[in-house]
Image (cartoon, grey):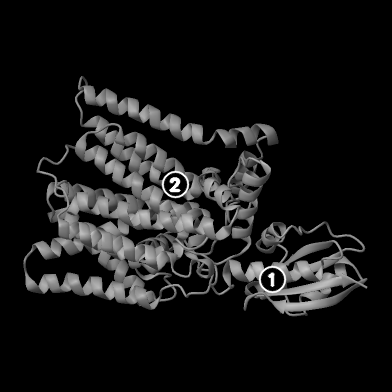
Amino acid sequence: MDRPAEPPVGEAAASPREAAALVAILVLAAVLRFLDLPTRGMWDADQGHDMLVLRAFVHDGVVPLLGPPTSIGTFHHGVLYYYLLAPVAWLSGSDPVAVVAAIAAAGVAAVAVTWWLARSIGGPLAGLVAAGLMAVSASAIEESTFIWNPNLIALSSAIAFAAAWRAWTTGGARWWVVVAAAQAVTMHCHVLGVVLLLPLGGLLAADLRRRAALDPGRSRVARAAVVGVVIIGLSYVPLAASELATGFAETQAATAFFAAGGVSVAAPLPVRVLIVALRILAWPLTGLVTSAPLAAIAAGVAVIAVLAWRSMVAPARERFAARWFALTLGWSAVALAIGAATLATVVPGLPNDHYHAFLDPLVFVTVGLGVAALWRTGRPALRLVGGAGVAALVAFNVLIWPPAVAPDGGWPAASTAAARIATQTAATPYALLSLPSFKSGEALRFPLVREGHPPAAASEGVALVVVCDRLFEEAIGAPCGGPAEDPAAGAVGAALALADRFDASPRTAISIYLPR
């Protein structure tokens, strides 16, 4: 496919008015992410696990070779996630708030890169609309305010898409190296990011194909592609080292999982594709689909309409981008419906849609392209439609912004609970038990380790701290606050007596049992 011939839409330098608007948007994005940062982000087992790994890395010199465990628990994400956050953990003394601040900064940077991508396709207004919506998006804010590996992929994927578009429109082969580096980060931060290899690789293949066989640019693109493959391959050297040291444990776990059919779901594939597609398109604009289904459907339909419209009647440059976006989003919906079948269901109280946050920038850019195109028509009625749509999205997101304090109390609640546990068990070793059994107690283990009072193995004469999560009371089979904890404590040791019981948060109950 030939490169669009008309002059680039968004290549001119920003006017003072546009620059001022962008700065205002970035300041707003920063305020909305850094305000109440210590308390807004959830603090659960995943966050405790990640901080334990980072602390062991920067404090004890234990170099991780694998990333966080996947939600199915049989294999792991990539380790670059830890390497990217390690400098902040080292400088801050493993302070979770500092690590969250780094993630929040990445969220602000993603707004800037999304502006760049939208502007380069649809002009200044498209860039400002896309960046403005991302800045105020409740979903994008949530993704920026707690520690979790998928929360970096909006930035990395935005860089990958923007660099790929730059390579396509300018012919600069070196941009493909940037694409590869950003894609490596995306895949490491979440294994599902691998689905972007096809649309990004497809554009690379098209870049090669459109060049004549003897064109020097063709060889430069080919060399950049080789360098990119090497970069992605080198990023998995720690995984290879782990595999050699463990007898290919990761490979065996993944193979066993997929050989067993993965996660079984009742919904047939076509239904899953529709659900996943709606979640992809609506999540950045209206949040969790089950919280506001009508708004989600309206947002999803609007995005599809814009893509169809711009794919047919836009200038060649924008038309190509719209088609690329449509193919990327459609392919991702199918791939995720097959490879991540659990996306067909929603689990209230847990992070749900961050798994496909690598597609968020495309959704924001698409809306920006649509609004800019409506404005360029010069028709007051159409301009009103575009402006009203943006106003409605902004107002809706303001209404669903994350609360100032997370439902589980965030890191401060866990830190306070750990200090109370350390005081109660100061005179005796203690073990840590989590309910339900399939959930680790690392949300409390990290602050206890940081307090210098780590738990020990359960045995006779050792105190017991039971952490009970009310979100999983049905799986536990009994309510927290005594009925669940007392039998669990009795099973560990009969010579234990309840010494203290309190709520670390509305969701988490803590019971401390000391030897009689």
Q: What residue would you read off at disc 2?
A: 186
Which residue is at the far left? 378
What residue is drawn where x is 17% and y is 38%?
3
Q: How far from the left and from the top, in percent, is residue 280? A: 38, 61
Left or right side of 388 for 364: right
Q: How far from the left and from the top, in percent, is residue 431? A: 81, 62
Left or right side of 501 for 249: left
Which residue is at the far top? 214
Vertical position of residue 7 compared to residue 359: above or below: above
Q: What residue would you read off at disc 1?
A: 417
Could you say which quadrant of the image residue 95 lies in? bottom right
Q: Please name the amino acid that badge 2 sits on.
A: Thr
Could you say which quadrant of the image residue 114 lies in? bottom left
Q: Which mark is residue 391?
A: none
Q: Considering the image in quadrants, where does the C terminus appear?
A: bottom right
Vertical position of residue 265 compared to residue 479: above or below: above
Q: Considering the image in quadrants, where does the N terminus appear?
A: top left
Q: How far from the left and from the top, in percent, is residue 352? A: 49, 64
Mark 2 / mark 1, whichever is N-terminal: 2
Left or right side of 176 for 291: right
Q: How far from the left and from the top, in percent, is residue 203? A: 29, 39
Secondary element at image label 1: helix
